[in-house]
Amino acid sequence: MKVLVVGGGGREHTLVWKIAQSPRVGKVFAAPGNAGTTAIAENLNLRPTDIAGLGKAAKEKGIDLVVVGPEAPLALGIVDHFNSLGIPIFGPTKAATQVESSKVFARNLMEKYGIPCPKGATFSSYSEAREYLQKQRPPVVIKAEGLAAGKGVIIAGSLAEAHKALGDIMESKIFGSAGDRVIIDEYLSGREVSLIAFTDGKTVLPMVPACDYKKIGDGDQGPNTGGMGSYSPPAFFSAGMTKKVTKNILLPTVQAMAKEGMPYKGVLYTGLMIVNEEPVVLEFNARFGDPETQVILPLLKTDLVDILMAVVQDKLNQVKIGWSSEACVGVVAASGGYPGSYKTGFPIKGIDSVDRDVSVFHAGTKLGNDGIIYTDGGRVLTVVGVGKDMAEARQKVYRNIGSIYFEGCHYRKDIALREIDRIKSKP
């Protein structure tokens, strides 16, 4: 069969890599893909949001399955379009994608159906939001309502910071129309984790949990990014906790969406805070996480295409998913200046010199006409290692990432370190 993966980041390179391993798959296409996908797929020069163009290409190429990576095409209704063409596609409809594209929709859904979430309030008026903020005790969490490439949540440690964040979002429109409405939430203290699940609208099968790092600098310093690294699985998140989240959050959410007339199929990403052993939803996403996908899919033992097709065909209850008991660590190498302004077009050296058991998933890369790989984005590469335990996986990554070089390259040095320290400190 022929599979088309929509998107061009590290998540999509990982999806292409895993899908290409399936004996069911004869050819993989990526739109637009990147320099990494060229080795295992045919790249199509189409933007992920060019839904009509993607539909036309899928018909011409005889695509049997489309897998959507990023949120923007989902929010624009790519699934609805492909359904109308009769081409199997993995992902939620435009209406169902509102769990991510509208934080207000997600908040209202959780409150209506008793799904645990932080206490907060929604505002479309800047002056009313400012007035509410004056009565809050920091830290507080300010969330832009719409899609903001994973950067629309600001944790403010003081009222001055909170007012600045509010002004940036609602007045200066740093996230565009995504900031037309905001949610001001209480700040929750605990352990943060992502639990992502496959669902066909009835059955829910969770993946292994993962933890990601949003801040640009070591020790969680500096501004938010799309994610600077991740690891899986965290030891504090037990099999019992996975069952609890599935029963109290994932299943009720999927059932709520069905009751609302928006059956949810695809991947449901739940960003959680574990507060006194109780899971609370910080956010939902309507797709695979990035950079979590880069550390989750290397641990998947079941054929990914079997799972994707079971979701599309409403047969997920017939699938059993197997996971490796190993650990996985991924570290993002970013362009100088990211997440602010940065330059691209620098040659990347050393990718070929990494150990054979280490994966390099490309994100912001481009293959030049001269055969050289150049930087082409903020997050450039994710270097991933799998090991018998977290320490071994982490060691593999950091032993290899230093041999990769491009001008301005920087990465966090502390990915998964807290997990290893936590394990060491256990009596």
Image: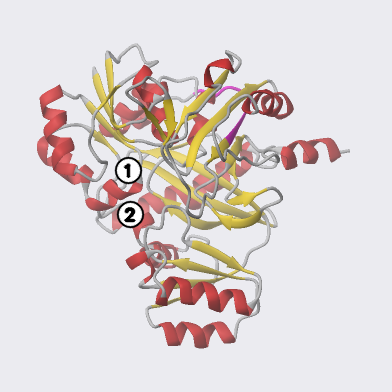
Name the residue located 16 percent from the left edge and 29 percent from the top edge. Answer: 58
Is 315 left, or right, of 417 in this rendering? Answer: left
Nearest the viewer among 53 and 368 is 368
The residue range painted magenta reads: 322-331
Coloration mode: secondary structure
In the depicted structure, whether residue 425 falls above or below residue 388: below
Is 137 left, or right, of 152 in this rendering? Answer: right
Image location (x, y in percent) of residue 321: 47, 25
Name the residue located 52 percent from the left edge and 49 percent from the top edge. Answer: 338
In the depicted structure, whether residue 336 falls above or below residue 104: above
The reply to whether residue 304 is in sight is no
Q: What residue sits right under mark 1 in the picture?
A: 201
Image location (x, y in percent) of residue 172: 41, 73
- Residue type for callout 1: Gly
- Residue type for callout 2: Met
Mark 2 in CB contact with mark 1 (< 8 angstroms): yes
Crowd around label 1: few <14 · some 14–19 · many ≥20 (10 Å): many
Q: What residue sits right under mark 2 in the picture?
A: 257
- Mark count: 2
